[in-house]
Structure formats: C-alpha cells, structure tokens
Image: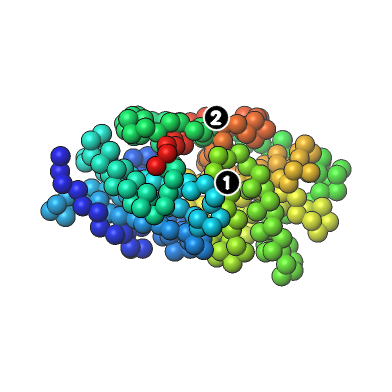
Amino acid sequence: MTTLRFVPATLDDADYAADVFTENEPDDPADGAVIRHFWSNPQPGAVAERYIVTSAGGERLGFAAHVHQDWAQMPTRYGQVNASLRLHAKTAERLGAVFAHVEERARESGTAIFLAGASDEDTMRQEVLLARGYAEERRFKIWECDLVANETMLRRAAEDSRRKMREQGIRLVTFDSIEGAERLQRYWELSETTTADMPSTVPYVPVPFEIFVRGWMGRPGFHEDRLWIAQDGDRMLGYSVLAYPPTRGLVWNNGTAVIREARGRGLARGLKLESMLQAIDGGTPRIRTGNDSTNAPILHLNEVLGFTQVPGGSQFMRPA
C-alpha cells in the first residue's frame, strides 16, 4: 500500500475538500465556499483537526478530519471522524488506514465514541466501517422534489394552506419583512428550541447567539428573503428555509421546524410550501431535503408534497 502522509489542512484547502466529497457523491456536489465558511466559524471550545492525505511523494489523495464539541458541554464524549479519498486512490485498505489515523488523533483528543457517516451507495465505506467495529446507529432519508412536474399540485396545496393559516390568524412572512432589532434574537431562540427537539443520538450542544448569526445566518447561500417564518402576533412559531449554494450544488431545505405546542395545525406544511413556491418562481427545478428515519410527521409531509426518496445514508458508531 502507498505510504500515506497527513498534511494539516488550511482554509485554502476547502475547495479541494469539496472536490473530494463531490467525487464520492457526484449527484450532490459540495460547495467549497460553504465549507470554508463553516471551518471559519467553529463553536466555542470545539476541536477540529483536518488533513490533506498525500502519498510519500506529495500527490494529493484525499481528505481526513476529526471534530468534536467542547467536552464541557458533551458529558459523553462523541467525536466525528471522516476519511474521504479520491476515487483513483480509493481502496478498502487505504480507506481503513485513513480512518485508523483520524481515530487515533480523536482518541488522543479525548473522544470516547467515534461517529462516522456513509451514504447508501458507498458500499466500500460501509464495509470498512463495519470491519473496524462500527455499527449502524441511525438512518437518514434523503428526498428530492421535481418542482416543475409538481408545480400545479403545489400551488393548489399552497392556496389551501394559506386559507387555513388565515383562519387561525397565522401569518407566513419572509424574515426580511420582520421589523425590530430583536428579530435575530427571536429567530435564534426558535432555532435552538426546535433543533434541540429533533431526533438524535448525540446530545445537542447549544449554539451561542453570536455564532448563530455569524455562522448560520452569515453562511454563503443564506438569504433573509428566503427564510419563511410563521408568526402569531409577534411570536415566531416555526420556520422553513432553503439554502442556495453560491458556486455549485443542489438547493436544499436547510430546516423546517415548528415549536412543539404549535404542531398539528398545518404550519410546517404551509411554511414548506411557501419555500417551494418561492423556489419555483425563482427558476429552481428541484430541491432536496433530509430527515431522520424516525421523524414520521415530516416524512409523511414530504410524501404529500411530491418528494420521492433518493439514496440516503447512515450514521455509524463505535467505542473508541
């Protein structure tokens, strides 16, 4: 096997990492600008070591990393590990060696449980993880909607949803139309409440307000006029937002969520429909969304709104 070297990655390597990810999942291209942004805005206390994997002669073969949140906020020390190789360099033996390296670095950093992901189509990656003692922990379903084929149905559904929202006194508005300096604080609180309520094995680590505004709302592809909010008076009850990658990639639903006490009233449906019609009017032909396989209400909503399943992925886990 080719001798592998691990060169610390810099922000300037974000485009290369995006190329590696895209080569492994060509139907869902990664955007280097988005990756660079998130590398630039870590959570306080988080640790991230990233590497360019090379041959002994310096040929770039792939990307590797391990990341974990502040241990003070993570009583059970979960850490994410990743190994991704260019297709011409990708063998089970080499992929296993890259995982071994980042696992050791993560272990030295205090990680007690390794987390790794694999798409349904990457059978080599799945087999390598299983051979290394990982077990599947959670499954994630990916859905795609052909907005052109479903336009008529979606417009009819949106009219029905708007009527129901009016009857309840709920307004669906874009974030840029909401006035007041406190609107950022209220959206942050809404996001934190609903995100913490989503199905997950790993406990949610709260995002500080400043990081949320700079990291989440400041990311490339985020637009205030494409973030839809459900309001009851001045209270934010839910949101839906699409992310439009600035250089390449698909348009994704980056979240549709409603606070627990407002569920069952059709708000998520109405919010998602407004986002989808906005995408249609902007000329977007298709969008994607992803959900945990145990989130039955949103999975049903996807089916009703014309989404069809495409290959998804799994989260794998093993003790360090």
Q: Nearer the viewer, residue 183 or 172?
A: 183
**Residue lying at 55% horizontally and 29% vertically, measured from the top left:** 308
Q: Is the C-beta separation of discs 1 and 2 under 8 Å? A: no
Residue type for callout 1 = Pro
Question: Dividing the image into 4 quarters, which one contains the N terminus?
Answer: top left
185 relative to 76, above or below: below
Residue type for callout 2 = Thr
Left or right: where 310 falls relative to 278: left
Q: Does residue 228 appear in the picture of this structure?
A: no
Q: In which quarter of the image is residue 15?
A: bottom left
Image location (x, y in percent) of residue 96: 28, 38
For the residues labelled 1 and 2, the Cα–Cα distance comes to 30 Å
Question: Dividing the image into 4 quarters, which one contains the C terminus?
Answer: top left
165 relative to 300, above or below: below
The residue at the far bottom in this view is 181
Which numbered marker is on residue 308? 2
Q: Nearer the viewer, residue 283 or 24?
A: 24
Please rate how many residues cluster around mark 1, counting C-alpha atoms within 10 Å: few if below 14, some from 14 to 19, many from 20: few
Which numbered marker is on residue 275? none
Left or right: where 236 falls relative to 69: right
**Residue lying at 42% horizontally and 52% vertically, measured from the top left:** 110
Q: Which of 176 and 85 is in front in this view?
A: 85
**Residue lying at 25% horizontally and 57% vertically, measured from the top left:** 7
Query: Residue under circle 1?
Result: 203
Q: What element carries label 2?
A: strand
Q: Does residue 304 appear in the picture of this structure?
A: yes
Q: Is mark 1 on a helix, strand or loop?
A: loop
Image location (x, y in percent) of residue 65: 35, 51
| Count of marks, rendered view | 2
Looking at marks 1 and 2 on the same chain, the residue that comes earlier in the sequence is marked by 1
